[in-house]
Image: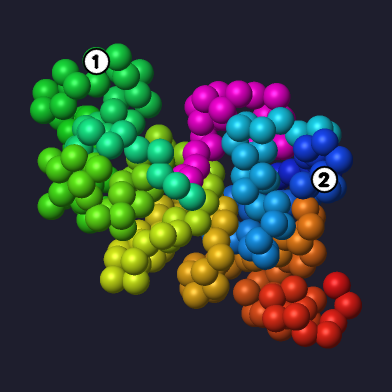
Amino acid sequence: MTIALETVNLEKTFGALAVTRDLSLKVEAGARHALIGPNGAGKTTAINLLTGVLKPNSGRILLEGSDITSLPVHKRVLRGLSRTFQINQLYPDLTPLETVGLAVSERMGHGGDWWRRLGTHAEVNGEIAEHLSRFHLLDAMNERTATLPYGKQRLLEIAVAIATRPRVLLLDEPAAGVPESERHDILAAVASLPRDVTVLLIEHDMDLVFSFADRISVMVAGSILVEGTPEEVARDPRVKAVYLGEGADV
């Protein structure tokens, strides 16, 4: 078993408030792993720790066996760890073509003159077209991002994350705020992510979680309460107690 991403006894406090406590999580290479839990469980803090937005008070973070605990955000991206956000972080005045082009060019080391390379370099153009097609954005590639339906914006954010060629991708509630009429494209995009990319999904939507994940970790009060296959987690009385208020000891 090869571990792509691991936390070891990770702790984060804000004053007297402990948000993650002894958080130990292993995500296997190539897995479709979901991290779920009730509001306030510490999931977003955990993702911010993994990506370097926050620094832990103690514990370690390992990416493919290498300690990245002290690395800044951009160096983690260069190591192959990318994420999406609950609220998109896109440039509203750029088009999908320009946005994906920027991500591809930046990865290739041409970020400063990315706009010159649109339409002039076959390698860049071919990859941009591949991402736009995969995420159903060809029909909107020349529209300002700010004018796109929210579902398209979420697809664009996933496309940008994939354009960095991550080995581990953190999807932070990709369907959050997406109208029901646009959710199908999000679900299809998540399901079609390359299998050579390890995915950790943070999500409240249980339909999405159980249709996507091959392993689920349930986080409660800053630590992992239960971990297993979707079937094992669905049957676990402690999970039922957390989500349904049933009378099991937690």
Residue 68, magenta (yes or no): yes
Where 234 sits versus 215, above or below?
below
User: Is 98 drawn above or below residue 155 in the view shown?
Assistant: above
* Residue nearest the observer in this picture, 92 or 202: 92
Q: How is the image coloured?
A: rainbow
Identify the residue shown where x is 38% and y is 65%.
Answer: 187
SS class of the residue under badge 2? strand
Q: Is residue 65 visible?
A: no
- How far apart in space, not on screen, are marks 1 and 2 (Cα)? 44 Å
Residue underneath mark 1:
113
Q: Earlier in the sequence, mark 1 or mark 2?
A: 2
Q: Secondary structure at mark 1?
A: helix
In the image, taking residue 2 as reference, residue 189 lies left or right, namely left
Q: Please give the residue where the numbered disc 2 appears in the rendered image.
A: 18
Write down the region rendered in magenta. Answer: 61-85
Badge 1: few (under 14), some or many (20 or more) residues near its Cα, within 10 Å?
few
Could you tell me which quadrant the C terminus lies in?
bottom right
Q: Of the residues shown, which amino acid type is indicated by label 2? A: Ala
Measuring from the top left, give residue 128's x and y in whole percent.
23, 38
**Which numbered tag is attached to residue 61?**
none
Give residue 119's quadrant in the image.
top left
Amino acid found under the numbered disc labelled 1? Asp
